[in-house]
Amino acid sequence: MEYNFNKIEKKWQQYWKDNKTYKVDIDESKPKFYVLDMFPYPSGAGLHVGHPLGYIASDIYARYKRHKGFNVLHPMGYDAYGLPAEQYAIQTGQHPEITTKQNIARYREQLDKIGFCYDWDREVRTCEPGYYKWTQWAFLQMFKSYYNTALDKARPITELEEYFEKHGSEGCNAHTNAKEGFTAEQWNAMTEAEKSQALMDYRIAYLGNTMVNWCPKLGTVLANDEVSEGVSLRGGYPVEQKVMSQWCLRVSAYAGRLLRDLDTIEWSDSIKETQKNWIGYSEGAEMLFPIVGCDEQLLIFTTRADTIFGVTFMVLAPESDYVDLVVTPEQRAAVDAYLNEVKHKTERERLIEKKVSGVFSGRYAINPVTGKEIPIYISDYVLAGYGTGAIMAVPAHDSRDYAFAKHFDLPIIPLIEGADISEESFDAKDGIMMNSSNERLQLNGLQVKDAIAKTKEYIEEAGIGKVKVNYRLRDAIFSRQRYWGEPFPIYYDEDGQPQPLDESELPLQLPEVDKFLPTETGEPPLGRAKNWVASNGRPLELNTMPGFAGSSAYYLRYMDPHNNEALVSKEADEYWRQVDLYVGGTEHATGHLIYSRFWNKFLYDYGYVCEAEPFRKLVNQGMIQGRSNFVYRIKDTNKFVSFNLKKDYDVTPIHVDIKLVYNDVLDIEAFKAWRPEFADAEFILEDGKYICGWAVEKMSKSMFNVVNPDDIVEHYGADTLRLNEMFLGPIEQSKPWDTHGISGVSKFLKRLWGQFFDGDTMQLVDDKPSAEALKSIHKLIKKVSQDIEVFSYNTSVAAFMICANELSTLKCKSKSVYRDFIVLLAPFAPHIAEELWHQMGEQGTVCDAKWPTWNEDYLKESMVKYTVLFNGKPRFNIEVPAGTPNDEVQQQALTHEGAARWLDGKQPKKVIVVPNKIVNVVV
RNA sequence: GCUCGGAUGGUGGAAUCGGUAGACACGAGGGACUUAAAAUCCCUUGGCCAUUGCGGCUGUGUGGGUUCAAGUCCCACUCCGAGUACCA
């Protein structure tokens, strides 16, 4: 009987579907295990061969856990809101919902062909009202909350209002972006609108005037993680800085917990490191500098308090509120000119130029320790968004201050002994202090580290500042001026203040619009919707939520996807708790994986979920790159020269569709037919073949290197695709898709199939397996069991091949041995395993079979081979019965017939016996 | 610049606690079957030398070190990848 993978795979996929084999429910009698893939954005291009890599890895793990007796939750869904569908809608007028549905159908079809064990009854789509109701609900909870820094958790904003009534803002322990506080009297004297405005500075979801990344081309703002090097991640359009009123999430309040809790989860070092950098913890001090002729003081942040004696000027960010305060009338014109210049530069231009620029404000500050007057400058190398937007400049020990001081000819005072600052600053936090003592503070002779500590102590005592921790992590900007996203459950009252919709009005459904473009007046697309008003007739918010809104809590929704009363029921949450294994790419390190953690922690603060972290273990699969092929055209001709002969000609490499190439050999006739201009092409061959060049590049249509999983399934079968993807290399590693190796995996399955049948009859028998066969299969059980736990799937596949080969050589026909083999193989190649399982007459589906355990007794060698080394060089082997004591092994090695030659009549100086491996004789 | 990874045959990659490289697969070469091809099966395959003596030398980016023993540990360097970047 032939191995007809197409028939087998179709048959079992249908069977699993009809029997809901992978449907899962809460079952208190079994331990749970939650395996999750990062759900895909259904793009128009469909899946390529890189997508399934992580899905296959998690599928194997999910199936394995099921064999081990776990109740496994393994769902899939779609991150359905996104820019591409909307851009397509703008161009074609096609409603994004239609495009999205089509794309989802295509994805589903492709996914089904690979044989995943998803429970499709739990599918979620972020764009469906039943789903986004809970995205809106979570937003409302955030709107109605503030962050209490004393309790270190979110609390209802009503508690804060009560506090304000009694005590004002002083001592409220609330995380805030408010510039100024107020007393209880002031609070109580406020109108409702004023109170509403004041509370905005405290809410976890708040409307704030912030500097945003504005992308004119996309017509929307973008989050920090959606921008890289001054251009948008999607589309690569330039991004400007602009102050706008936007919804924000107070992620920064959670910075400390997001950082600390990284220690409680099993993620790779690299992704933890990325998050640590993104959160950007830095310990320093805030210090007050009096301003000459002004009541206000400058508040600055520094990590180098010890360098206070070297401060020779101050710098403000151009956007800093201090600017207007300190600018003198004489300098007004110069400052305005500078501010104007800065404003018209995009962040990208600022980065590229990297020129020193700035302007003197006309005013001086007083160094609180030395009492000296120092000039205050304004420059764009200081960022408004970090620290206080103002710094004390220490040119001797900070390279940016140094460049500025050189440019404006400001004094530079060295503070560390032996540091040469004639050419550049000395930035290292290392050395002995000098020039740093007066009657108030003495730092001379101290190590930098100790000087920092002493200065911090001093400034707190003297009341000129306090120790402060700063984070780089900013609040997330949560508004998008787009159509295809979740509407905000917010309306605006008579005073123009945003107010929450009642929860009973959720979901607030996305309205229809005539066009997907902004309105003529520049309002977001929702401004086109008719009757876009709340039930009380008041206008609704026109912005929509960003892409990460819907993906921040989807893992919770899978636990209880049809619940209309809660995001997730208490029962479901307490059973499934958190994702035990999360598989996805590293590209979400600073986006989704931060927002999800934040979102989960917020829900955790209120007890809506019982775990502080959403994803216990994270595995990052690498990217599968494309492998492009090239042909080489001789310049100014239509002649192509084979790869190894091209050095003799002046050639232009041209991408050629990989479908026209097999094992780097070009199908010349297909190539001629590919493009009209190649129809009469000529070729210079080597060995009668045209060999193409190749390169590893991103998989993309324009490089003609996209490999579609459907084609592979069609040609080789899903099981072969699965095994091949796992066999390519370690799961975390990026690697090119390699079709070359697939024949090896394909051959393995064919041979295995052949081992079961003699002609058309099953040839396995209920036989007592030989010791060798037992050893072989138990070796495999051990290897695969251990490999799966550490995601070392590539070596597992190799082990399968070795074992199958050994059993074949041993002519093993024993059912019990092959039964174990099939169960082990089932997670990797479920279709063939299921078919063989049934062919052997086993009951039920193979995925419910108990995972075999290995018996060490079968693995023991009766004889142990030792390599005998003389002075570290292997010379001969000896075999002794297992368990022979070391000194006896040594004795045998030295009396062996070969030993005399290497001993050369001398006595050994030393003999080292490594159990079961080595005898090393030092002569 | 800073942080974190990595470097092993022609290729993808194995190698547990340091135990004497290159598993497995591809590719290549040779052979069997076949009129022929495909498919299948067998042998060889890091390099150099010796191959009617089953052997010798060398070898895991470079240079040094620790050790009886280093791909693995330590120090310095080179190159590659990723993250981040006026973060004070």
Image: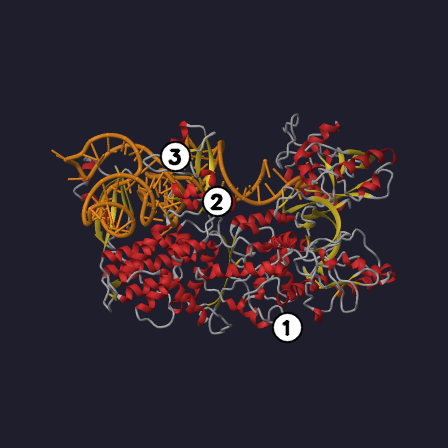
Q: Amino acid at mark 1?
A: Glu
Q: In x, y percent, where is residue A278?
A: 62, 48
Q: Is residue A820 left or right of residue A526?
A: left
Q: Is residue A308 left or right of residue B37?
A: right
For marks 2 and 3, give the one nearer the viewer: 3
Dot 2 lies on which element? Answer: loop
Q: Which residue is mark 3?
A: A683
Q: In x, y percent, where is residue A510?
A: 68, 63
As measured in the structure, the alpha-carbon distance from the residue carrying label 2 to the one carrying label 1 is 49 Å
Pointers 2 and 3 in contact (CB under 8 A)?
Answer: no
Tell me the quarter of the picture where residue A758 sits: bottom left
For marks 3 and 1, give the one nearer the viewer: 3
The reply to whether label 3 and label 1 mark residues of one chain is: yes
Dot 3 lies on which element? Answer: strand
Q: Which residue is mark 1?
A: A565
Chain ID of residue with mark 1:
A
Q: In x, y percent, where is residue A670?
A: 40, 44
Seen from the viewer's position, the closer of residues A776 and A729 is: A729
Q: Is residue A195 left or right of residue A65?
A: right
Q: Amino acid at mark 2?
A: Phe
As measured in the structure, the alpha-carbon distance from the residue carrying label 2 to the one carrying label 3 is 21 Å
Q: Which residue is mark 2?
A: A704
Q: Residue at x 34, y 63 (%)?
A: A822
Chain ID of residue with mark 2:
A
Q: Earlier in the sequence, mark 2 or mark 3?
A: 3
Q: Earlier in the sequence, mark 3 or mark 1?
A: 1
